[in-house]
Image (tube, coloured by chain):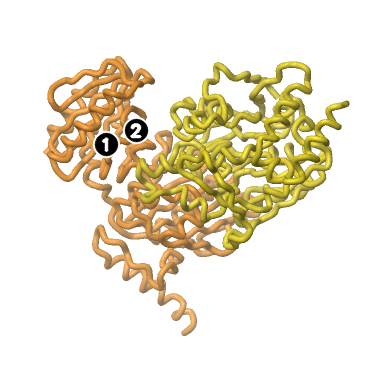
Amino acid sequence: MIKRLGRSLPGFLICAVLLAASPGEAQPAPDGLSGLRAFLPSAKESGDWQADGEPQEFKGDDLYLYIDGGAEIYKEYGFVEVLAQDYKNASAEGLSLEIFRMKNPAAAFGMYSFKRTAKGEPAALGAEGQLEDYYLNFWRGDCLVTITAFGGEGKSRDGLLLLARAVAAKIQGPEAPPGLVAELPGDGLVKTATRYLRGYLGFMNHYPSLGADQFHVQEGVRGDYASGASLFILRYGGAEEAERIYSTAGKAVQADAKAREFKAAGPLEFRVLDDKGRRLTVRAAGRDILICVEPAGGDEAAKLFGLVLKKP
Amino acid sequence: MDNKLNRRDFFKKSVGGASAALLGGALLGHRLEAALAGGGRRPDIAVVTGTDYLKSAMKAVDLLGGMKSFIPRNSRVAILPNVQSHHPGTFTKPEIVRAVVRMCREAGAAEINCLSWLPAKYWSAAGLDAALKEEGAVLKIVDLKDESLFKPISLPKGKALREARIMKELLSHHCFIDMPITKDHAGNKFTGTMKNLMGINSPQTNRIFHSGDKTKPDDIDHLDQCIADLNLAIRPTLCVVDATEIITTNGPFGPGEIITPRKVVAGTDRVAIDSYCATLRGLRGEDIKMIKKGYEHGLGEIDLAKVRIKEVAA
């Protein structure tokens, strides 16, 4: 009896620490990395899916040992540590559970938004979750959880959800996405495709047109619309910085051999067609740069920009 | 004088300094011989589409003249599949590895070794170690912490990289088959034949492929240049690329969105192959800096209109 109480005490303490953490702060990991182990499903909770080997844990720059060649994007958003545990069922189907602790909830949401796809199906997990073809992601607080199925179509989907629910029940923390996300106009917005950006890599991976190197993204958001348009709001330290970057980017785009029909539409807006025939409209607006990428015949830019600027 | 004798003669010369076979111009001679052996114009790139990936890989190499055109009898062959993770669409399929090892055996290779410094666990999780064993190849894991297992090679024409340290083990082979899966890379947007060669570098060399902040455009430009530079020194005997089921987002590790071109692509022109594979994702070779830099180095042809591409069903 004493032994059982002794075992359950650390779990109890962990929950107390997590509940006491103030919103927006990274939650402390008791005993270093072992804090993430508290989020693993118990053998009972994981049902037919039993742990396959020991969990792997990586912290800081050791992420490169785990994600050789692909760690940079996690670092850009703000990575702290990861725990990975494989599972198998009796039919030898496999699942991999990864729990990432990011620097703060914005970083967790950002990486979540980077990994999801527009075709994903919303899933009631954590603050927000999405089920994709063979994997799912959800986030809450400073944690991002990814569960991937390996082969076998039978029970994998059920397994993904079973493990996800068990983990989600243990993770507490803030659930609101970064404020910039709410500045995207809601009408026609494809909610499963919203991306939150914290630097060049995230931007470059989700920006399909000219001048990707030139916008020096610090914080931004991309929203896709039912009309086919994509709207980017890029936020800078102030209006002066935004205008300077706008000016440099405009010159670079104008000089790009892939650009066609470059037109200045006022001192702080230009329009151009890119090499794929898409219309790019860029406007400096206070501390923001607004970008609309849409099919050549599209005319959403003015409307979307107007809606962004109307917001308080 | 038959072709076999010519090939054996060619390899007698190059085996004396095995590194010359991989690093020198001798392979170009071998390529020329292979191209002429069929008496006609063989394709530069063979592309086979189908759901039986083993069959597709075999057919792709057959369209290039068969493995015997590339692998002389009694040679030691090194192969380099990609296995950065076991997420779907991120590693070279075991069926394609099986096909290549089997073809090498049938061509009379004395030894086929799969070289890597990645942990054995990666190979077992992806089902690749079983495929290698069953087909008679050996998985040789090089201890990445032991720098003495890597040999410096000079890159006098490198623009960003003047020296690389590559696995010594590779240099003891006569032939080298580059076997990437083509897929997304969140940094430079593309993985293919040229980038896969980072798998034979020492971790020390891979570290200098980054100039500073790995999330900045300058660093990615530097990485792309280093990859192109490395490719100046190492010319694979043959490339067999998995373009069957591949991730197009969140690469190279995944998980991410998957497309299923169900193609196996084979050839020797890395720039042309990578340019072709880029088109499977709606890109062009010119869109990928690494491919452009490879073209600028004269490693191959970026304009697919100038490349003989043979596409067939399996």
Residue A301, numbered label: none
Question: Can you say which quadrant of the picture contains the C terminus of chain B?
Answer: top right
In the image, B76: left or right of A64?
Answer: right
The foreground one among A116 and B228 is B228
Q: Which residue is mark 2?
A: A207
Q: Which residue is mark 1?
A: A215
A308 relative to A174, above or below:
above
Q: Colour of chain B?
A: yellow
Residue at mark 2: chain:
A
Which of the 4 quarters of the picture holds residue A190? top left
In the image, B141: left or right of A303?
Answer: right
Which of the 4 quarters of the picture holds residue B312? top right
- Element type at mark 2: loop
- Element type at mark 1: loop
The foreground one among A208 and B143 is B143
Q: How many marks?
A: 2
User: Residue B13: x, y in percent?
Assistant: 78, 40
Q: Earlier in the sequence, mark 2 or mark 1?
A: 2
In the image, B63: left or right of A233?
Answer: right
Q: Which residue is located at x 58 percent, y 29 percent?
A: B273
